[in-house]
Image (spheres, rainbow, N blue to C red):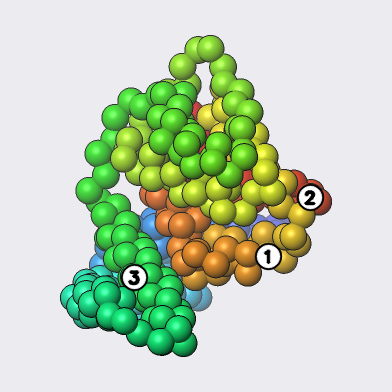
């Protein structure tokens, strides 16, 4: 009788432990599922577990504390980011008025009969003023791009057609520099749902970059997969510089008229539309790749 009693007690203990383990697993599974949802979405809901196991409930309580802290930090970041964008927009906008006035005074001075040294100094001032004006305009455009994500107008766009239009717009400038672009495109249209204006801006910024930095060639390839490759010789570059091409305000020394924002803007626009943009370097060839995968 006693052995049976002991077996019964052991069976009850094992059953109780198995139930406890099952409840703990269930509670942890609930936490895992809810935690992913809470982190992805902008919600004030906290984690809830159905189990009464004190260890699992304590884990959920500690995670809820961290969720509250994370949400507070996220709100502060978004508010600060929005304020920074507004500040950049306002500053770049406010700089336009004094820059216009400076240009006006420079034009008046250049009409005067001035010594050669003064004329040379005025030329340097004009050159630096033009660089500042270019940077101001790019800052304004960059802040507008960052703030316009929710205003994108998506439609079915032909990558072929938009790319051809961009190349045509730059063709005269390219040929003036002795660059005869080699273009490869499929006969069938490659279409994606994108913002047409943003796509044109991406192509224009990349072509502008090639116009400044190419050693005299440009090979453009559109693939049926939605990849667009812009390859050109750039013997003066190195892998470190190429790795920073999409950083804000970075420009290689050869680009004396560059603000370092063109490719950065292109990357933001591509990501806003679900695409990617990257650069690779295999001496002496630089290749910038834009990819819009099928949706």
Is tag 1's residue or tag 3's residue first in the polypeptide sequence?
3
Q: Secondary structure at mark 1?
A: helix
**Residue 68 bears which disc, if any?**
none
Q: Position of residue 226 (x, y in %)?
A: 53, 29
Which residue carries the number 2 mark? 284
The residue singled out by tag 3 in the image is 133
Q: Quadrant of residue 94?
A: bottom left
Residue 118: x and y in percent read 41, 87
Callout 2: helix, strand or loop? loop
Q: Cα distance, mark 1 to mark 2?
A: 13 Å
Relative to 188, does residue 277 appear above or below in the rendering? below
Distance CA(mark 3)–CA(mark 2) = 33 Å
Which one is in front in this view, the residue at disc 3 or the one at disc 2?
3
Residue at the spot 58% in from the left edge and 44% down from the top edge: 177
Asked if residue 70 lies left or right of residue 25, the reply is left
Which is nearer the eye, 69 or 262? 262
Q: Name which residue lies at 60% across and 32% down.
A: 181
Label 1: how many Cα within 10 Å (few below 14, some 14–19, many 20+): some
Q: Earlier in the sequence, mark 3 or mark 2?
A: 3
- Of badges 1 and 3, nearer the viewer stands 3
Q: Return the residue at label 1.
A: 241
Asked whether residue 207 appears in the rendered view, the answer is yes
- The answer to whether residue 30 is visible is no
In front here: 132 or 244? 132
Query: Within the image, what quadrant is residue 252 found in?
Result: bottom right
Mark 2 surroundings within 10 Å by alpha-carbon count, few (fewer than 14), some (14 through 19), many (20 or more): few
Residue at 46 percent of width and 57 percent of height: 262
Counting residues from the N terminus, which is met first, the one under dot 1 or under dot 2?
1
Are the residues flagged by discs 3 and 2 in contact, CB closer than 8 Å?
no
- The residue lying toward the viewer, choosing from 3 and 167, is 167
């Amino acid at each position: 009788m006693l052995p049976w009693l002991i077996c019964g007690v052991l069976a009850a203990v094992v059953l109780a432990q198995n139930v406890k383990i099952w409840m703990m697993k269930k509670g942890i599974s609930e936490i895992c599922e809810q935690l992913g949802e809470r982190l992805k979405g902008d919600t004030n809901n906290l984690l809830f577990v159905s189990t009464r196991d004190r260890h699992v409930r304590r884990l959920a309580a500690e995670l809820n504390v961290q969720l509250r802290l994370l949400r507070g930090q996220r709100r502060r970041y978004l508010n600060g980011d929005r304020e920074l964008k507004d500040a950049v927009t306002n500053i770049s906008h406010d700089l336009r008025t004094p820059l216009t006035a400076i240009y006006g005074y420079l034009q008046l001075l250049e009409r005067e009969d001035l010594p050669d040294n003064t004329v040379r100094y005025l030329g340097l001032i004009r050159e630096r003023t033009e660089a500042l004006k270019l940077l101001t305009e790019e800052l304004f455009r960059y802040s507008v791009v960052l703030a316009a994500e929710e205003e994108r107008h998506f439609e079915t766009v032909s990558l072929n057609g938009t790319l051809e239009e961009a190349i045509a717009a730059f063709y005269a400038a390219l040929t003036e520099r002795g660059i005869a672009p080699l273009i490869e495109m499929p006969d069938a249209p490659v279409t994606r749902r994108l913002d047409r204006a943003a796509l044109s801006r991406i192509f224009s910024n990349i072509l502008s970059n090639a116009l400044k930095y190419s050693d005299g060639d440009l090979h453009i390839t559109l693939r049926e997969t939605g990849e667009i490759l812009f390859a050109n010789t750039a013997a003066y570059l190195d892998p470190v510089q190429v790795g920073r091409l999409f950083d804000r305000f970075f420009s290689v020394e050869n680009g004396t008229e560059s603000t370092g924002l063109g490719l950065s803007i292109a990357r933001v626009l591509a990501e806003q539309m679900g695409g990617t943009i990257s650069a690779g370097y295999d001496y002496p060839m630089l290749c910038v790749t834009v990819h819009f995968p099928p949706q």
